Each structure stands twice: as C-alpha cells, then as structure tokens.
Amino acid sequence: MTKSPMLQIDRRSLFAAAAASTAVAAANGALATPDGTVYEPRGWVGRHKRLPILDLESQQDYLEGFRIWVNTDVNQAANDRIDRILAARGIDPKADLPLEQVLANLKDDPIVTLMPAAWLRVQQLMWRTLDDHFHAHQDQYLTEMEAADKVGPGSLELNPKMYVPEYTAREIHMQPGGYVGNMFAGQLYHHGTNEFFNGNNYQDETHDARAAGVRTPHDGKVRRVLEFGTGIGQLPMALKRRFPEAESWGIDIGGPMVRYAHMRANQLGLNVNFAQRLAEKSGFPDNYFDIVTSMQFYHECRAAEIKETVAEAYRILRPGGVFYPLDGNPTTRPKSAARTFRTFWIYRWNHEDWQMDWESLDMIALMKAVGFKIEPGTGQNGDNIMAIKV
C-alpha cells in the first residue's frame, strides 16, 4: 500500500501555531499544516469527500461491488432455496414460522448459509480497513475535527461527561467501538454506510429522498425539525435543504457521530445544529418542534427506550406537529421464513442487538397510548407511520 500523502502534524505545537488557519481550512473541508498551509488530499466529488489514499478507495470500491453481488444474486439464490427446501417438506415458506423451526430446516444448507457468511465477511473487512486507516492517521483527522468544533454556521454540543447507557454502547453493525467508543465513529459510519446503500448514497440521495417524503403538519408550518438518533446528520441536512428557513436539529448519544456531522454540515455550508443527547431525554422545551423524525433508529433501541422516545416526541412537538419515524412498521410487514432467517442472523452476527425488540413492538399502539392521532393510510404493509399531536 502506498504511503498517505497527508502531512504529519506535530500535535504538541499544533494549537498555538495554527488555530486560526486550521479553523478556516476545516470549514472548507481541507487540512492545514502547522505553518498554515492548506492541504486537500484528493478533493470532493459533489458532496462526497474522497478517501485520501487511492489504495484504500480501491479496496472499498471492491468491497462495495462484492456486497452488491451478495445483496442481489446471492440473496435471491438463498431466498429461492429457502422456499424450495420448506415446500419440499410440506411447510409453507410464507407462513409466520417459529424461529426454531426455521433454523432447524435451514442451518445446514450451504446455499442458504452462504449469503450471511459472505455478507458478514465483507462487513468485517470493510470495518477493519477503514478503522486501520483512520487510526494510522489520527493526528490529521483529529486536527480537522478539533478545528471545526467551534466553526459555524451550525452549532455543536458535546457532553463528554454525560451518562452513556449500556444499551447504547454496543458495536452495532460490528462497527469497531460502536457509536460512542471510537473517536472516528463518524468517519467509519459515513464510508461504511456508503457501502451499505450499495453505492447509491454518495451524494446523500437516499436521505434527500427520505426527507422529501417526510409528512408535514396540516397547517403547513415548518419552523423547527428534529431527528432522533441522527448519526452523522444526513437527514437533518436533507431536511434543511427541503425547509431552508427552518431550524434543523439532530441529536445522538454518539459524541463522535455528531462531531463529524457538525464538521460535514459546515463543510457543505448548511446551518444545522447537532447535540450529544439521548432521544428519550432530549432536553428540548415542550411544544418546540413542528416535525420529529428518525431514520433507521428504532431497531437500535431497546423496547423500554422506544416507548420513552415516543412519549418524548409527543412532549416536544407542538399541537398539530408530526411524528414521522422512517423505520417502517414491523407489525404489518409480510412474514416469511426468509425474513425470519435474515432477522435472526442480522441480530446474532451483525450485532443488531435490539432488532428482536423492534420486531415485536406495535408502534401504532405505542403512539396512540401517549396521545398521538394516527394519520389514516399510514403504517400499512410496513409503511411509515404519520402521527399527529392533538
């Protein structure tokens, strides 16, 4: 592998020598040396800041292509095989079968098990190569974030001494250190999820599409929006593009995640606010937001906290405000043996530790229990649920 072209920074003399120049450089997505020289390794492609080493970018490109093959051809072959195995044994593959029965029939088939085995191996290799890179060049990446911490237009609130619940300190998706225990969690998550989305989100296309689909209050007033579990902030950035006059917020327990989100939003010139907070204890005033949403958040929460966040959303929404979690409705999704098998291996081996909690909950019932009115026609067949505060 070739050496990184990024310049080594002496952190002992960095801050006194280059505070102002690094702040300006970070605001523009570049790095700066102690003498103030701005250095941008390989530039941007639209909204996507390229990885600084060609070898690393090539590795990730290969792994992404392999993942796409596994998600399409291998996955289809495995699902077809599941249906054939069960049908040959007189079992309806579309029935809601107990997990034990599904595993007993499928666990020894090489075609069925190839799909999770291949998927998990490419996942592990992706994380290892990215994590190795960011830690090998930690001075540069820490400098970039530290310089951007107090640069606007958006605000950043970090709470390094806050209590971090054990349920959040998990290596979800096998991500090294999870969202709270790795100082480069944001960088890892961003490049990793570019691959999760099969290469279709390098320009935040998926988040722009999701933001475009977020339901709005019937009176049309959108002054403040919030995302629970924002990760690296792509959805509140997309909501800011959709509602440029609105105050846009993202909160997440992962301090490294919102730190990276803040840096990237400022690099993109978006006035979005990020805070390290728990969704179930958001700290916002009553009746503050017009829209509270989330994206792929609830399957990473325990059942108890899911219930608390629904109540918290009701509290901080103004009357007529909309709660619109972009996680679908697990109780109305079609059942099948293939889905049950996939849910299990994702839970067990990809460390989606609370996936089973999410699958077992009735989100519509939870929303109604705290006072929400469910918009007719939403939440059916796995669709997202629009809930209105009355």
Image (cartoon, helix red, strand yellow):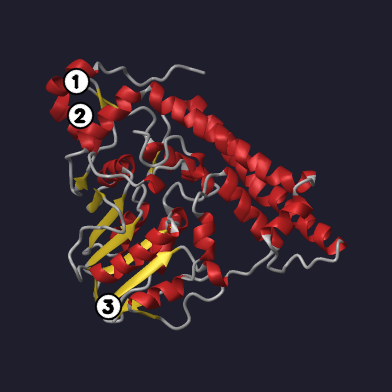
Mark 1 vs mark 3: which is more N-terminal? 1
Q: Disc 2 or 1, which lies upstream in sequence? A: 1
The residue under the point 34% across, 70% down is 323
Count up the numbered dots.
3
Residue 250, x across and y down, in percent? 29, 54
User: Callout 1: helix, strand or loop?
Assistant: helix
- Please give the name of the residue rendered at 52% of the width and 43% of the height, measured from the top-left corner: 195
Q: Amino acid at mark 3?
A: Gly
Question: Image check: 362 left or right of 76?
Answer: left
Q: Residues within 10 Å of mark 3 (few under 14, many from 20)?
A: few
Q: Position of residue 275 (x, y in %)?
A: 24, 49
Dot 3 or dot 2, earlier in sequence = 2
Instruction: Tell me where residue 102 appears, x and y as whole percent.
Output: 72, 57
Name which quarter of the figure residue 122 lies in: top right
According to the image, label 3 marks what residue?
220
Residue 269 coordinates in the image, percent (x, y) = 25, 48
Label 1 crowding class (10 Å Cα cut-off): few <14, some 14-19, many 20+?
A: some
CB under 8 Å between discs 2 and 1:
yes
| Residue 295: quarter of image | bottom left
Distance between the alpha carbons at the discs numbered 3 and 2: 41 Å
Q: Nearer the viewer, residue 327 or 263?
A: 327
Identify which residue is drawn at 42% across, 40% down.
Answer: 178
| Residue located beneath label 2 in the image | 22
Q: Is residue 40 left or right of residue 296?
A: left
Return the residue at label 1: 14
Report helix, strand or loop for mark 3: loop
Type of residue at label 2? Thr
Residue 199 seen from this side: no
Disc 1 to disc 3, how far (Cα)? 49 Å
